[in-house]
Image (cartoon, helix red, strand yellow):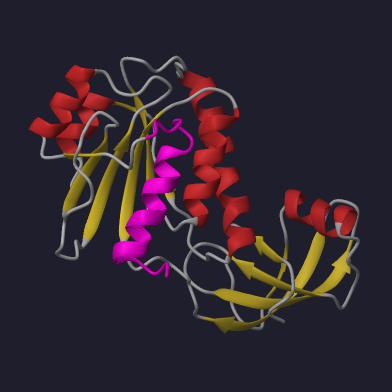
Amino acid sequence: MTDAPRFYTERPLAAGGELTLEAAPSRHIAGALRLREGSGLRLFNGSGGEYSATISAVGKQAVSVRVGEHCPDDREASLAVTLGVGISRGERMDLVVQKSTELGVTAIQPLVTERTEVRLKGERQQKKLRHWRQVAVSACEQCGRNRLPAIADPLPLEQWLLRAEAGLKLVLHHRSEQGLTEKKLPDSVALLVGPEGGLAAPEVNAAEAAGFQALALGPRVLRTETAPLAALAILQFHWGDMQ
């Protein structure tokens, strides 16, 4: 059933059990995919691995399934990377969340910086977080990951600099002449990327004072949605599971 469509559910999963899926995956299964009783699925809930499943009943708003065998594969990156990224406008942040999930990021920390133009508070912040987490869910369904990257509540940059912990801490800065020279395999990486317009000079200085190493990715200035993805791919190639 390796080619069966994959779906995330918040329901508990156990081999031999039966359950009714949430409204969103049910609508997609019954409406967009037009699957019927007896069709195969793969289900995961973020606790590790995935389960085969067979559709037992299809309704307009609810699909019921019988849960089959558990497969323990997680397909998680061997290198743990936390991405601290300045919140960007429109679809740019969605793109960063989606593609960094595909590239194996462990956690995403949205940051408020001097040049951040998006200000989130209260219900608007919670709505945006729910949206980003759903973007990550959809990316996991597509790419085969069975564990969701953690997406934290937004923080001011200065607060995150005080609490960020990793074996190697990097801040992308296009005016740096320093490339990736670390030879020893780090156990974890914290990667800091600014919003549109980049980080202000005092913010780069504060990051370096907090133990972050300035890193340039080449002679061209990359957009805020391009830079973290390029950096993640490079990190996963050097120390992770991309070949």
Q: Quadrant of the N terminus?
A: bottom right
- Residue 151 visible? The answer is no
Q: Which residues are magenta?
A: 220-243
- Give coordinates of residue 109: x percent, y percent: 36, 38
The residue nearer to you, when weighing 4 against 14, is 4
For residue 9, side relative to residue 78 (left or right): right
The percent coordinates of residue 104 (x first, y second) are 44, 58
In this picture, residue 121 sits left or right of residue 2: left
**How many marks can you see?**
0
Q: Residue 60: in sight, yes or no? A: yes
| Quarter location, residue 6 | bottom right
User: Looking at the image, which is closer to me, 41 or 224?
Assistant: 224
118 or 38: which is nearer to us?
Answer: 118
Vertical placement of residue 128 versus 217, above or below: above
Whether the magenta-drawn stretch holds residue 117 is answered as no
Against 129, residue 231 (above or below) is below
State which quadrant residue 128 falls in: top right
Location of residue 38 in the rendering, given as x and y in whole percent from the top left corner: 87, 78
Q: In percent of the image, x 71 and y 54: which residue is there?
A: 22
